[in-house]
Amino acid sequence: MTTTRKQGRPKSEEKYRLILDAASCLFLQEGFANTSMDTVAKASGVSKQTVYSHFESKDILFQHAITSKCRSYQLDTQQLLEVYSGDMPFRQCMQKIGGQFVRLLQDPQAVAMFRVVIAEAVNNHHVATLFYQAGPSASLATLSDVVEKYAEGKMQPEQAKELALDFCSLLKGEFHTMMLCGIQSALSEEEIARHVSKAVEKIDLLFNHYLSQH
């Protein structure tokens, strides 16, 4: 079965992007709770019925907005799996993924969305769950799969997940907390490369440690 969007008709794709862009702006400006499908329809210049034809619910629309941001930095599930290649050394792969991860962490819209979610999570755990499932959890699960592929059967899935989580934690470090607090400016490309290299060096040691235990 195919949907209107999957048929790839320009008009349908254009409306999909209009809705998604308008919703992303509204979620940032008004928060999740104060954004309705009605306001999304008005902001995107389409009917409410058209919004629902692309997104069955506000929850799904919100998660698509998060996934879209991850995809723009090549960190969605499909793209992370495509990064894996038997011809690319483990460290090089982690350097590539790590660089995109840090760029996403310091993206102004990503920082703003994270702040919105944290603010609303106090009274609305649901929005925090949606955000976590669409963003961090999905990327972490796929990064775990990439690590496991490189291990070539010498690492258990739980070990691969632990390694992926350690890598993400190393990349965030103090940097991400300071970004959220507004006391850290964005890193330059040179600074990103150095920051990621340090994390990759440590995660490579852990990776080889797990392999040596097999």
Image (tube, rainbow, N blue to C red):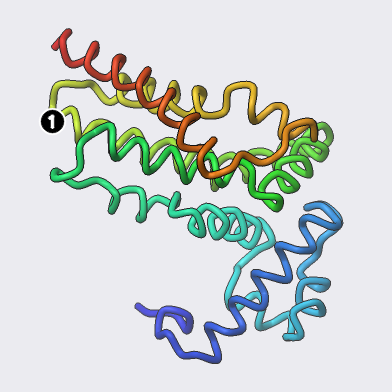
Q: Secondary structure at mark 1?
A: loop
Q: Is residue 54 above or below residue 83?
A: below
Answer left or right for 43 relative to 80.
right
Mark 1 belongs to which amino acid? Glu
> Which residue bears the numbered disc 1?
152
Q: Residue furthest top?
A: 213
Residue 63 position in % (x across, y down): 60, 54
Report the quarter where the N terminus lies. bottom left
Name the residue at 45% across, 31% down: 196
Name the residue at 58% across, 42% down: 188
Report the quarter where the C terminus lies. top left
Name the residue at 47% across, 46% down: 100
Q: How many tags in the picture? A: 1
Quadrant of residue 182 within the rendered picture: top right
Residue 11 position in % (x across, y down): 55, 91
Q: Residues within 10 Å of mark 1 (few under 14, many from 20)?
A: few
Quadrant of residue 191 within the rendered picture: top right
Residue 140 position in % (x across, y down): 44, 36
